[in-house]
Image (spheres, coloured by chain):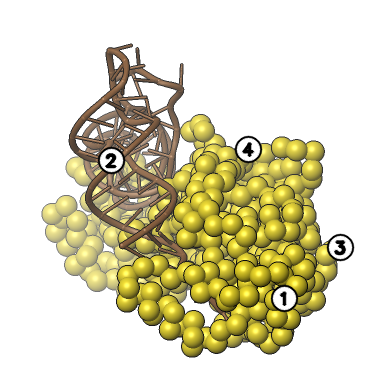
RNA sequence: GGCCCUAUCGUCUAACGGUUAGGACAUCGGCUUUUCAAGCCGGUAAUCCGGGUUCGAUUCCCGGUAGGGUCACCA
């Protein structure tokens, strides 16, 4: 690393919701900046007004805030390169365009869209690649002073100075290359006055002093264009760190909105912890080189290394996310867990004793809401509907079950201290007198909860209290 | 189609050219003297194919195959 301060940026376009792909790019840029105590910039690339989706800027900010990926410069907070919306920086792009024009490296597109479309079709029919530069106007060979003056409602094109293969180095992929056809006379400024991505992001990265560009691998093939602009502007390009694609869970294609990519805020709604989401995203394409998998955000900042990022794509895997989330939930304090769970339970269930019982069977907070919604927890607050035949277990007859329950009632009635520990003691003593413990324990569980499977019935009994417990046992007979 | 990228258990991945190819998730089995869950212990499971280079290739090179990306007045 040079002595230059690290500056990274996340530069989304506001064209819809963010999914894991975009957020991981933001995360890696953020981690790299934090690791070197540098600057992380949020810049909105809103140069395509037609594709802009209402509300996406708010959405992007919300996602980053949820995850704690705070930006040092950008919307809402400003910074030395204000404004951070490309649509508000049009003069800047024109100024840079003028530099290229003056050098004879940019020219007005003399063709209409229809004409270009015809060139393209013709090339296609002849089964050769379409390259705009094959149709350059005659005057482009003459002196730059004789180029027509740019009329700003016509597109401005880059005059590719030299047709050649391009080689460059990438922090993740190592040596990369592209053939000469990757370099063409592309558009710098559109006829509506807005710059193209290819031009605007370079101008901004130069202006904002960006040192490391994290981006998806879909940009590999346009890198020669970027490099040509840097060269034309006589500016040294930043380091590129190209990230491998995130693949759809059940396919080999890049994860996209059509392949079930979820809005990142869905994960918030489902009750994932932001730190778990970050941990998961970081492990999707990166590893520390040892066996650790669970990281706090601070640990990631310390240990993350862009050079250890994977070059092959990784599939989205929500099962692993669940596991990572549970690991992070286990790092929470008792108080935090209690507060979170109680906040998700209805008023009638505001009992801290329920917390450990519920916590052990979930991977994310949303599962609590699900249990409530599906009535799985109703037995805590109301007597279950008992279907008597379900009480029968291990070939017990109905008489044996009734007898077992009566005995349970007898011994529990004598208990003064109705704690789970005492209840368990009593009931286990009793159960040991049966040829199978299940012969009494199963009917008790069922009488209390109306279910075959449930959390620890002794704790449930304690929560219900002596009267209610005995009443339920009686009711089942 | 041109150009480019990628290829290790089902999934995510580790392995200066020399390892019984390691770990994690999932799965399966056992334990936790009641179920489920959790936890612990254990098992099954992988180097895409073909050539080279080398004493030796998962690793380096070439070819094939497969998958992906990209070829816009979209980013």
Residue drawn where x is 57% and y is 68% of the image: A185
Sequence-first tag of 1 and 2: 1
Left or right, residue A463 beside residue A405? right
Of badges 1 and 4, the one in the foreground is 1
Few, some or many C-alpha atoms within 10 Å of disc 3 (few <14, some 14-19, many ≥20)?
Answer: few
Q: Secondary structure at mark 4?
A: helix
Sequence-first tag of 1 and 3: 3
Given the image, what chain letter belongs to the residue carrying mark 2? A
Which quadrant holds residue A393?
A: bottom left
Q: Which residue is mark 4?
A: A303
Residues at marks 2 and 4, CA–CA distance in whole angstroms: 54 Å
Sequence-first tag of 1 and 4: 1
User: Which numbered disc covers residue A432?
Assistant: 2
Can you give x and y, in whole percent of width and height, for residue A56 in the image? 62, 77
Q: Which residue is mark 1?
A: A146
Given the image, what chain letter belongs to the residue carrying mark 1? A
Residues at marks 2 and 3, CA–CA distance in whole angstroms: 77 Å
**Residue toward you, A452 or A391:** A452
Q: Which residue is mark 3?
A: A80
Residues at marks 1 and 4, CA–CA distance in whole angstroms: 56 Å
Q: Colour of chain B?
A: brown
Q: Residue furthest front?
A: A142
**Chain ID, yellow in image:** A
**Residue toward you, A40 or A230:** A230
Sequence-first tag of 3 and 4: 3
Of badges 1 and 3, the one in the foreground is 1
Of badges 1 and 2, the one in the foreground is 1
Of badges 2 and 4, the one in the foreground is 4
């Amino acid at each position: 690393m040079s002595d230059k301060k690290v500056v990274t940026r996340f530069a989304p376009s506001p064209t819809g919701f963010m999914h894991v792909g975009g957020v991981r790019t933001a995360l890696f840029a953020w981690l790299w900046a934090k690791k070197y105590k540098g600057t992380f910039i949020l810049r909105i690339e809103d140069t395509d007004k037609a594709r802009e989706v209402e509300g996406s800027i708010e959405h992007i900010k919300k996602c980053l805030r949820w995850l704690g990926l705070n930006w040092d410069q950008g919307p809402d907070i400003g910074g030395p390169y204000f404004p951070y919306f490309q649509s508000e920086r049009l003069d800047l792009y024109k100024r840079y365009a003028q530099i290229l024009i003056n050098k004879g490296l940019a020219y007005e597109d003399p063709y209409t869209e229809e004409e270009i479309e015809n060139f393209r079709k013709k090339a296609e029919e002849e089964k050769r690649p379409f390259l705009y530069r094959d149709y350059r106007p005659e005057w482009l060979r003459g002196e730059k002073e004789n180029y027509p003056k740019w009329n700003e409602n016509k597109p401005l094109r880059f005059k590719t100075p030299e047709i050649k293969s391009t080689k460059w180095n990438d922090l993740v992929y190592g040596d990369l290359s592209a053939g000469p056809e990757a370099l063409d006379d592309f558009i710098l400024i559109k006829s509506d006055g807005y710059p193209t991505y290819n031009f605007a992001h370079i101008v901004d990265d130069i202006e904002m002093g960006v040192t490391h560009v994290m981006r998806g691998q879909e940009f590999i093939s346009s890198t020669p264009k970027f490099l040509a602009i840097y060269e034309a502007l006589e500016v040294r390009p930043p380091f590129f760190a190209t990230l491998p694609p995130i693949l759809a869970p059940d396919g080999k294609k890049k994860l996209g909105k059509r392949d079930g990519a979820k809005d990142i805020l869905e994960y918030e709604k489902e009750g994932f912890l932001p730190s778990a989401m970050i941990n998961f995203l970081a492990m999707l394409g990166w590893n520390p080189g040892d066996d650790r998998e669970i990281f706090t955000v601070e640990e990631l900042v310390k240990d993350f290394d862009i050079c250890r990022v994977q070059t092959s794509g990784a599939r989205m895997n929500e099962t692993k996310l669940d596991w990572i989330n549970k690991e992070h939930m286990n790092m929470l304090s008792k108080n935090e867990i209690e507060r979170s769970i109680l906040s998700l339970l209805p008023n009638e269930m505001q009992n801290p004793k329920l917390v450990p019982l519920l916590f052990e069977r979930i991977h994310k907070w949303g599962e609590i809401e699900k249990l409530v919604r599906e009535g799985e927890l109703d037995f805590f607050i109301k007597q279950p509907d008992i279907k008597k035949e379900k009480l029968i277990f291990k070939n017990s007859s109905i008489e044996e079950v009734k007898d077992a329950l009566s005995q349970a009632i007898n011994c529990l009635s004598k208990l003064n201290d109705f704690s789970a520990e005492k209840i368990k003691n009593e009931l286990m003593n009793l159960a040991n007198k049966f040829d199978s413990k299940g012969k009494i324990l199963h009917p008790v569980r069922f009488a209390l909860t109306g279910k075959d499977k449930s959390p620890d019935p002794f704790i449930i009994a304690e929560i219900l209290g002596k009267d209610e417990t005995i009443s339920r046992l009686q009711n089942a007979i």
